[in-house]
Image (tube, coloured by chain):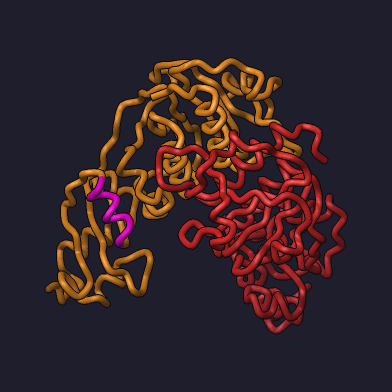
Chain colours: A orange, B red
Amino acid sequence: MIRSPDNDKLKTIRKLAQKRWREKLGLLVAEGEDLVAAAAEAGWEPRFVLRAGTDVEPELLDAVSGLGSGTRVVGVYEQRWQAPGGDLSVWLHGVEDPGNVGTIIRSAHALADGPVILGPGCADPYSPKAVRATMGSLFARPPARAALAEVPGAHLALGAHGKRTLDEVELTAPLVLCLGAERAGLPPELDVEAVRIPVRTESLNVAMAASIGLYEAARRMPAHG
Amino acid sequence: MIRSPDNDKLKTIRKLAQKRWREKLGLLVAEGEDLVAAAAEAGWEPRFVLRAGTDVEPELLDAVSGLGSGTRVVGVYEQRWQAPGGDLSVWLHGVEDPGNVGTIIRSAHALADGPVILGPGCADPYSPKAVRATMGSLFARPPARAALAEVPGAHLALGAHGKRTLDEVELTAPLVLCLGAERAGLPPELDVEAVRIPVRTESLNVAMAASIGLYEAARRMPAHG
């Protein structure tokens, strides 16, 4: 039973709240029964797991947890990154909000056979907020990292300024849906050819746009993956 | 120029961080240029607006702001609630996360002609986090509050346990998409008749499910609203 905040495992968990330590150590933290169960189900061996009252004094686990009081379990795992691929995947550019990145990972897991591919300027998918938003999908479907030029398949940009709408264009596998940040949008060369989701307003949340794009593509390419 | 934290307007803003004060006063706070501009564009007269450096010392505005340092403007408005209606709307049950409620208000504004109708157990759409997530759609399309029995139109429940899928059922206006919390789901009487979005996993984020449902309904009822 860990009874000191100076314990090395607790120190590691504290460090992993910071992006530079996550990158340096190549690790992530998953908090709560659901995420730790999702990791086990997907076959991820933890570097270590700490359970309140069994492995560590509850107050000490609470103190290192982003969830705060009442955290029952925290697991630390090695990050995994997969290669782009699949008949349907998503490429993101400059999506800085970790909640949006995590939610898109969850939606891609639900609707597509390929990963979410992180281009430049995206939030760390292994940040605590992103991990929580994936609801465990991160373990079943680890993310990829690549410049768009390295991603095989047809690139279909989804943007607010597209002349054609999503339902007007042909969709063929392998298809990569490309989305940018809500304000900055896509790089100009992609924005020119973007198709849009027919909306009454100026924009959608990027996670909503990604989910709708994935739904539409999955609906029209039912044989994918 | 306000130079004291004891100023009545600053006190009001501080109170409005709490739900009980929002209910008691019937007011909301909008922080930042974008939200205050969205309110003006939608024709909402503020109860008052405070601009940093003009109306109030910047540090005092920062201190009452949920955004923290660098807040340039805060507006206080009277809450508005509309009646259910429209050819396409959304009814929510037990959606406790204010970010999800706000995001769904934004998506409904983008894709439908009717409001988001809050049933029992939903987060306050006028909480700071929900207001931010709506990105101003709250002003253009205020929410409604009603039990489902009071909502006119065909009620179509979207749930993870539906036997039929969304694309298999006929959609006719006026249509009310009904969604529940991710864990608790819909009330049993609705869950029985729910249709599902075809997914590979157990569930979608409720805001994603609502957005996909709205997209599908808007696509198939193009003449709505």
Camera sees residue A24: no
In the figure, residue A3 lies in which quadrant?
A: bottom left
Q: How many marks?
A: 0
Q: Quadrant of residue A179?
A: top right
Q: Is residue A114 left or right of residue A4?
A: right
Q: Is residue A151 above or below residue A103?
A: above
Magenta stretch holds residue A35:
yes
Q: Nearer the viewer, residue B189 or A166?
A: B189
Q: Quadrant of the N terminus of chain A?
A: bottom left
Compared to residue A25, the image places residue A191 above or below, namely above
Residue appearing at x 79%, y 58% in the figure: B84
Residue placed at 85% from the left, 59% from the top? B44
Residue A164 visible in the snapshot: yes
Q: Nearer the viewer, residue B56 or A198?
A: A198
Relative image position of residue B172 (x, y in whole percent): 74, 40
Please indicate whether residue A83 sits to the left or right of residue A221 in the image: left
Displayed quadrant of residue A66: bottom left
Q: Is residue A1 magenta?
A: no
Residue at the extreme left of the image, as rendered: A1
Name the spot of residue A105 as percent of width and height, x first: 42, 40
Depth check: give the residue in front, B75 or B206: B206
- Rendered position, B1 above or below A37: below
Q: Is residue A157 left or right of residue A107?
A: right
Magenta region, residue range:
A33-41
Pinpoint residue B98: horizontal percent, then vertical percent.
58, 61
Residue B33 shown left or right of residue B168 in the figure:
right
Give how far across and how far down residue B53 sits, in percent: 73, 64
Image point (38%, 66%), residue name? A67
